[in-house]
Amino acid sequence: MTAWFSGEWPWYVAGPLIGLFVPALLIAGNKVFGISSNLRHLCSAIVPGRVEFFRYDWKKVGLWNLVFLGGVLIGGFLASHVYEETRIALSRLGIHDFSGVAPHELFNWSALLTLRGFVSVVVGGFLVGFGTAYAGGCTSGHAISGLANFELPSLIAVFGFFAGGLAATYFILPILLGGI
Amino acid sequence: MTTASLTEIEGCGAGGSEQDVRRPAFLLVYLLLGIAFGAVLSRSEVVSWFRIQEMFHFQSIRMYGIIGSAIATAAASVALIKRVKLKAISGEIIAIPRKELGSGVRYAVGGTIFGLGWTLTGACPGPLFALIGNGVSVMIAAVLSALVGTWAYGWLRPRLPH
C-alpha cells in the first residue's frame, strides 16, 4: 500500500486511471469530462460583462464541474502532502535533491518580475485561457474525451496542441531560458 | 472542454441533470471524483513542468503512454456504454454531444495557441489547479491570467473565424 504513495506512478497505471474519469462522469450524471470550460464558468460567475459568451446560467451548466475542479485542487494538496512525508522520510535516508514539479527559478512570486517568469506564468496562462476557449477544449475535453469519441475537431485540436507545444519548446524556451 | 455556443455547452450534461445537479449529494460525488483526479494528476507527475518538457523533446515515453492509455481506456468505456445503452445514475440515457467541425480554424488556431501556453506554463488547465494544491502558489497568477485569456476570447469571439 505504501508503495502507491511513494515515488511516481508508472504511466500504464496513471493513463488508464485518468481515462476512467470519462465513464465515471458519464455514469455519475451524463457529464462530459473537460476541465477548461471551468474557465468560462468562472468568467461568467465573476465578470460576465456584456459579452454574450458569458451570459448563461453558469450554476446550472457548470456548478458540478467547478466542484470537480475544487476537488482537483484539494487532491493536489493531499497528494503532495503525502509526498512531502515521503520526502521527509527519504531525507532522513540522506537523499536531499528533489527537483519538484516545476523549476523554482521560474515559478515563484518574485520571478514574476523577471521576463522569463512573467512570460512563463502570465503570458503562458493567458494563452492557455484564450487558446482553450477558442479551441473549445483542452487536453481533457479534446485529447481524452474527444478522441475517445472519435471526433475530427478534437484530432485537429490535438495536432494544434502539439504544434504550439513544440514551437514553444524549440523556439521560445531556448531564448527565454538562455540565462538559466 | 469549453464549447462554442450556449446550446452546445448545455448539451454537456443537460437533460435530467437540471433536477439533481445542485443537490449536495450529487455535488459530493463530483468533489470526490475531482479529489481523485487531482491526486492522480499529481502522483503520476502529469502536473510536472519537467515531464511536459520530456514529452516535447521526445525524450520519454511517459506522457505519451499516459495520454495514449487514457484515450484507449476512455474509448473502450464509451464504446461499451453506447453498446449497452447505459443510463446515468441520474436516470437519463448517456449521450455525448458531438462537436461541430465548422471550418476547423478554431480547432487548429485555438489548439496551437493553447499548445504554446501548455509549454510555457508547463501545465494544462487541470494541472494548473492541481499545482496550486501542490503548493506552487504562483500558479494562482497563471489561473487569473487564464481567466483574462478566456474573457478576451469571449469578447473577441464575434470577430474571430470559427
Image: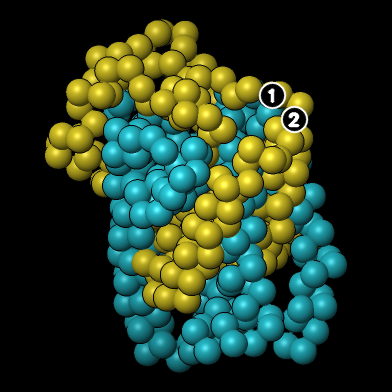
Q: Residue at x 75, y 39 (%)?
A: B108
Instruction: Compare residues A67 and B75 and report the one nearer the observer.
Output: A67
Res. A171 mark: none
Residue B42, can we see it?
no
Asked which secondary structure carries label 1, the reply is loop
Amino acid at the residue labelled 1: Leu
Please report contact status of discs 1 and 2: CB closer than 8 Å, yes or no.
yes
Q: Residue A114 appears at what percent x and percent y?
A: 64, 87
Q: Residue at x 69, y 24 (%)?
A: B101
Instruction: Compare residues A173 and B87 and report the one nearer the observer.
Output: A173
Amino acid at the residue labelled 2: Gly
Res. B101 mark: 1
Q: Residue B139 appears at what percent x and percent y?
A: 48, 70
Quarter of the rendering occupied by the C terminus of chain B: top right
Q: Among all residues in the image, which is located at the extreme left?
A: B24
Give above or below for B81 relative to B123. above
Q: Among all residues in the image, which is located at the extreme front?
A: A50
Q: Colour of chain A?
A: cyan
Crowd around label 2: few <14 · some 14–19 · many ≥20 (10 Å): some
Horizontal arrangement in the rendering, residue A162 relative to residue B33 (left or right):
right
Q: Colour of chain B?
A: yellow
What is the CA distance from the residue labelled 1 to the residue labelled 2?
5 Å
Crowd around label 1: few <14 · some 14–19 · many ≥20 (10 Å): some
Residue where numbered disc 2 is placed: B104
Give above or below for A138 relative to B117. above
Q: Quadrant of residue A85?
A: bottom left
Asked which secondary structure carries label 2, the reply is loop
